[in-house]
Amino acid sequence: MTKSLKALGHELTESEKQLKLLTQAGLTPFHQKLDDSGLFPLQPTQMDIFQINVGKMCNQVCKHCHVDAGPDRKEIMTRETMSLCLEAIQKSGAHTVDLTGGAPEMNPDFRWFVEELSLLGKKIIVRCNLTIIVANKKYHDLPEFFKKHQIEVVSSLPYFSAVKTDSQRGEGVFERSIRALKMLNEVGYGVANSGLILNLVYNPSGAFLPPSQEELELEFKRKLKDRYDIVFNQLFAITNLPVSRYLHYLVNSGNYEGYMEKLVEAYNPMAAANVMCRNTISVSWDGYLYDCDFNQMLDLKVACKSTHLSDFNNEDLLNRNIIINQHCYGCTAGAGSSCGGTTA
Amino acid sequence: MKTYYDPEDLKKFGKISEFQPELGKKFFDYYGHVFKEGALTAREKALIAVAVAHAVQCPYCIDAYTVDCMEKGCDEEQIMESVHVAAAIRGGASLVHGVQMMNKYKELSM
Ligand code: SF4
Ligand code: SF4
């Protein structure tokens, strides 16, 4: 895959088509499961994390990407919208700002934004795809830049081997990721007592559920240390949600029904109580507000008056009902899944 | 029924209790316990299970434990190595009987 579904003009870029597919599968409606667990309607508990998608442009075109990101995507957050974010963050009382994309570093105002965010004294997370660091000379100093602003780096590495990593993220991605990890380690990221946090994200390279996070973390730590002398802090094991390119993969490979059945069977009420939309708000490149990054990609804006940064109202947002649909089963399967790993 | 093995039947495994509930229940309780984390990890047990599945050549078990191995974080190399363990033991088990053959051969030869 070298182009986004959007560039290919694929029908699954339309959110209505995706939602239709998700609801047509004839499975127990997600709201019914939530109701049985005493969680419907689903509401926020607090506003801890402000997750900002600064654009859909990316140097990679991963097969599972729920953003449908890629080099051909031009949607990018402007400095003006970033300023609105800064105001809203202060109003929200969130303690963490989580920057995602695309490759957030490709936004021309990325560094300016991080510098402004630093002044707010919030914890900053950057979801760095690793290969961006070695993609071009102008990105080679990113590890130093991250260090300067004490940013927590969260990076995807689906496996400690090239075959599984490249089959999901593209030819040569594993080798470049290893190079980037070494650069991060060199400035202190992931190194014990450095205070510089480097967390890795595992997600399955196919139509199956993730393993136990703790066990896999041990295995990753052993293998990355032995084979490449690489260290990191924590491993987050996350589940792929049936949205956008991953949904496309499921349908195309004939795995859609089986995967959805598996997610429904693995529903865990404990994980449902801790889904990330309960303490996170998600902002799109153009400043609209969503319950999470997945709802953002499905065009499901928050169900309250405050749908855009320009009319950000914390109380209104905290009192909303979260919009749920069948894709939410991906957050509640097994040990649960969120941008910070398992939830149950 | 058109084939001896139907992938859909794997999901019906639990139904064997219909014809003998008591033994069925005992079996599934036992089965569940066997695969729990113990002195061996659940992951190690999944790799043993996939190897045994190949030794007993059960298509249901091969499907089920390939998925289980993947969901326990094993990659294709690790799963294939466990299949080779099964193959080595099976092949070795045939060959070691060659000693018996040789014994008999020698016994009857001048
Ligand atoms: S998964 Fe991340 S790195 Fe891959 S295409 Fe999507 S945004 Fe880019
Ligand atoms: S997909 Fe989004 S809205 Fe649904 S449960 Fe997960 S985080 Fe919440």
Image: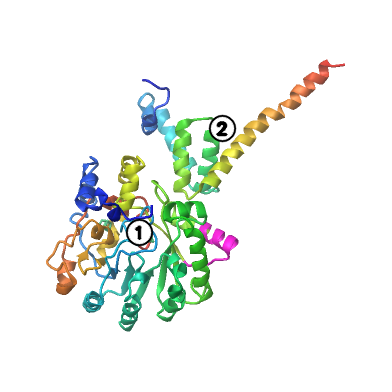
Please indicate whether residue A111 sits to the left or right of residue A40 in the image: right
Residue at figure coordinates x 47%, y 67% from the top left:
A233
Identify the magenta region: A219-233
Q: Is mark 1 on a helix, strand or loop?
A: loop
Extreme residue toward the right, this view: B110
Question: Ligand 1 within 8 A of label 2's CB?
Answer: no
Q: Quadrant of the C terminus of chain A?
A: bottom left
Q: How is the image coloured?
A: rainbow
Above or below: residue A195 compared with residue A129: below
Q: Nearer the viewer, residue A267 or A288?
A: A288
Report crowding for label 2: few under 14, some 14 to 19, many 20 or more residues within 10 A (C-alpha).
Answer: some
Q: What x and y, as percent, mark residue A3?
A: 34, 55
Above or below: residue B105 compared with residue B14: above
Q: How far apart are marks 1 and 2 (CA)?
A: 38 Å
Q: Is mark 2 on a helix, strand or loop?
A: helix
The residue under label 1 is which amino acid type? Answer: Thr
**Subunit of label 2:** B
- Res. A326 visible in picture: no
Q: Looking at the image, do the residues carrying marks 1 and 2 touch, with CB atoms under 8 Å apart?
A: no
Q: Main secondary structure of the magenta part?
A: helix
Q: Nearer the viewer, residue B25 or B62?
A: B62
